[in-house]
Amino acid sequence: MDSATRTRGGRWSRDTPEHGHVRIVQRAMRQPVYWLLVASFVSFALFYTALLFNLVPMLREAGFTTAQAVAVYACIGPSQVAGRIVLLTMERWLTATIAGIAGTTLPVAALLIFGTATPGSLSVYAFAIAFGAGMGIKTIVQATAAPEFLGREGYGALQGSIVTPIYAAQAVSPFAAAMIWQAGGGYHLLERVLLSLAFISAVAFASAAVFALKSRPAHSPSCTRQPILIHDVKSRAVLPRMHERHIAIDSAVATGVTQAVPGKRRPM
């Protein structure tokens, strides 16, 4: 540790980068936009993680065969990729606000479709497409909304403070979903909880966008339309890692689904 970065009492000096990052996060936490973004992203993480881990048994309980359930599940991954491709293709004409609203409202529509889908109907595939596309779009928005709404200064520290509760929510979500399933004696209660979480995520993000727009001075450069991707080294380095992480999660879940199909065993 460089002794020049500490005072004689052993505390951090106020002119160190570490202290500057702390001040940036503290300043952001005093704004409603920050907490609305955290609420939106955490709610999204809770519902989509629980849904991914429980989708096949939910479909089986609704009367779908295992083959149909796996086919529906298999549509989610390509839909994620399609959503990201569309978003990146239209980057010049869309902002993180528009993309975030689309990414959080599509899953709400998907869950409404899911609640009315019956075995043999094609609407269940519309659910998978809308849900997957929303997940793909939201993955990118999660990395770019904070810089647009709260400023680009201290991007790493600010983004780290936001994603920490998101990772915690992803870890807790499968256990919480199992407890809700057990308490409800089936998946009907869990479906309503997931729809409520998706709705909260959409409303919180839209509210964050409104607060961010109102808090910007009329002469501020950030009032001009910014592209979805922030064209700097930091965000360009973050986005590939986020894509890799979500691909790893999807692969792990898909492996569990494959092992649940009768006749397929885990290799020893």
Image: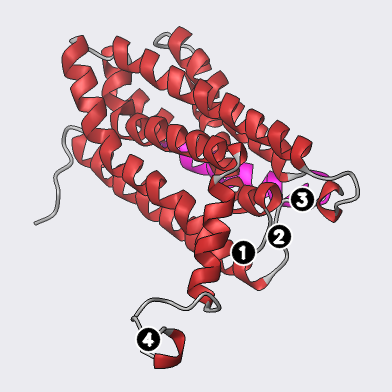
| Most frequent secondary structure within the magenta stretch | helix
Please tell me how crowded label 3 is: few (under 14), some (14-19), or many (20+) other residues with Cα within 10 Å: some
* 214 to the left or right of 67: right
Q: Which residue is tagged 3?
A: 91
Q: Which residue is tagged 2?
A: 230
Residue flagged by tag 2: what amino acid is it? Ile
- Residue 139 painted magenta: no
* 255 to the left or right of 89: left
Q: Which residue is tagged 4?
A: 8
Q: Is residue 56 above or below residue 37?
A: above
Please tell me how crowded label 4 is: few (under 14), some (14-19), or many (20+) other residues with Cα within 10 Å: few
Residue flagged by tag 3: what amino acid is it? Glu
Residue flagged by tag 4: what amino acid is it? Arg
Q: Which residue is tagged 1?
A: 235
Q: Is residue 146 above or below residue 54?
A: below
In terms of sequence position, does the residue under pointer 2 or pointer 3 come before the other?
Answer: 3
Please tell me how crowded label 1 is: few (under 14), some (14-19), or many (20+) other residues with Cα within 10 Å: some
Residue at position x 48%, y 19% from top? 111
Residue flagged by tag 1: what amino acid is it? Ser
For marks 3 and 4, give the CA distance.
Answer: 50 Å
Q: Whole-percent x and y of residue 36?
A: 55, 35
Q: Whole-percent x and y of residue 142?
A: 56, 47
Please tell me how crowded label 2 is: few (under 14), some (14-19), or many (20+) other residues with Cα within 10 Å: some
